[in-house]
Image (tube, grey):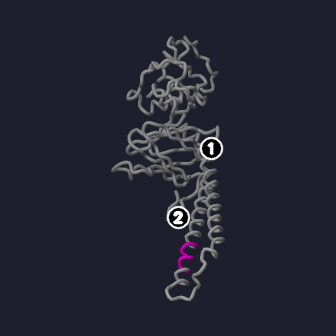
């Protein structure tokens, strides 16, 4: 980890450099306009000071071209910055298809991390270099904010919903992460370390944590434990939506709208099943709010997500 004082944090992700250039563009443009405005103010204060001999007649006729030129130039400048920023924003919110999903639960005052293969960490996150990583995050209590300055990423982590962000680390090393939202009296201690490793070292680190069940396997066990398979399984007798091929698919709802079956939709279907009812199915599913913890929810979501590659309707039963 770098020590010392730097004007900007170290850059260690694929988008960090472009983010710095955008920041520099905003600073330079703002500084130029600020200098122009205050420079003209100073010139006019001196030129049109009391008792000066400067001409004061027909001012509108002499200056309209300057006014139009100044307005158009600044409009074009800021419009360019807007499109630049919007393009970068879209890149940051459209992860590639080959991302590795890692689940993060925020809690006063720690970050609990769970890898797809079952390894767990607290206030630490190990990731491989040059691989896209997507963090799926939620909070158990209050609003937190996951921030890694070296990657130029930060995202509010909210209770009751999933937030996600992705990054591609480009440099091996250790980088600080911290909560950027005041979340209580021990907020300052809610910090951690992100360790970026070579691919081989990362695999060895995973192996060293000991063999464990994957999130999908744990989710499958919970699926049976909570009785979900009784309705959604192939042998279920209740008319419930099939889960095979569900993840990522558009789902028509009873109110006529459509929703994409992402992590948030699956989570809401477990905790708030009456909020978005699938079209053609009765609203008979009970709520599991308060019965399933956030970590178990991640496992169930991982299991349902793993069914996304199955043939749609494989376990579907005919409508009554």
Residue visible at 49% across and 40% down in the picture: 137
**Does 308 appear above or below 26?**
above
**Does 32 appear above or below 176?**
below
Q: Is residue 225 visible?
A: no
Q: Nearer the viewer, residue 289 or 173?
A: 289
Looking at the image, is mark 1 or mark 2 earlier in the sequence? 2
Residue visible at 57% across and 29% down in the picture: 258
Q: Position of residue 236 (x, y in %)?
A: 51, 13
Q: Classify residue 186 as left or right of residue 160.
A: left
Q: Which of 266 and 71 is in front in this view?
A: 71
Q: Residue 102 carries which label?
A: none
- Residue 37 is a magenta residue: yes
Q: Residue tagged by mark 1?
A: 131
Q: Residues within 10 Å of mark 2 (few under 14, many from 20)?
A: few
Q: Where is residue 278 in the image (x, y as percent from the top left)?
A: 53, 23
Q: Residues within 10 Å of mark 1 (few under 14, many from 20)?
A: some
**Does dot 1 land on a helix, a strand or a loop?**
loop
Q: Which mark is residue 6?
A: 2
Residue visible at 60% across and 31% down in the picture: 248
Where is residue 74, by image quadrant? bottom right
- Residue 219 is a magenta residue: no
Residue range in magenta is 36-43
**Does 314 appear above or below 250?**
above
| Quadrant of the frame with the C terminus | top right
**Does dot 2 land on a helix, a strand or a loop?**
loop
């Amino acid at each position: 980890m770098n020590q010392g004082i730097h004007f900007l944090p170290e850059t260690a992700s694929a988008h960090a450099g472009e983010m710095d250039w955008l920041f520099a563009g905003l600073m330079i443009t703002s500084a130029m306009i600020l200098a122009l405005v205050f420079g003209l103010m100073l010139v006019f204060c001196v030129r049109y000071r009391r008792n000066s001999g400067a001409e004061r007649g027909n001012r509108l006729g002499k200056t309209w071209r300057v006014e139009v030129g100044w307005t158009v130039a600044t409009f074009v400048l800021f419009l360019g910055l807007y499109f630049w920023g919007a393009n970068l924003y879209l890149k940051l919110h459209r992860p590639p298809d080959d991302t590795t999903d890692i689940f993060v639960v925020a809690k006063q005052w720690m970050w609990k991390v769970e890898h797809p293969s079952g390894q767990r960490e607290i206030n630490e996150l190990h990731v491989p270099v040059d691989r896209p990583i997507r963090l799926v995050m939620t909070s158990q209590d209050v609003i937190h904010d996951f921030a890694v300055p070296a990657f130029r990423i930060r995202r509010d982590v909210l209770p009751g919903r999933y937030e996600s962000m992705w990054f591609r680390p480009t440099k091996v090393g250790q980088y600080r992460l911290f909560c950027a939202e005041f979340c209580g009296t021990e907020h300052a201690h809610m910090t951690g370390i992100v360790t970026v490793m070579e691919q081989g070292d990362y695999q060895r680190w995973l192996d060293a944590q000991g063999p464990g069940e994957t999130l999908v396997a744990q989710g499958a066990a919970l699926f049976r434990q909570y009785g979900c398979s009784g309705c959604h399984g192939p042998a279920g007798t209740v008319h419930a939506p099939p889960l095979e091929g569900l993840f990522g698919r558009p789902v028509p709802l009873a109110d006529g709208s459509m929703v994409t079956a992402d992590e948030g939709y699956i989570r809401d279907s477990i905790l708030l099943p009456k909020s978005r009812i699938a079209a053609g199915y009765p609203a008979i599913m009970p709520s599991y709010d308060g019965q399933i913890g956030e970590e178990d929810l991640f496992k169930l979501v991982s299991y349902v997500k793993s069914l996304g590659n199955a043939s749609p309707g494989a376990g579907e039963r005919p409508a009554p």
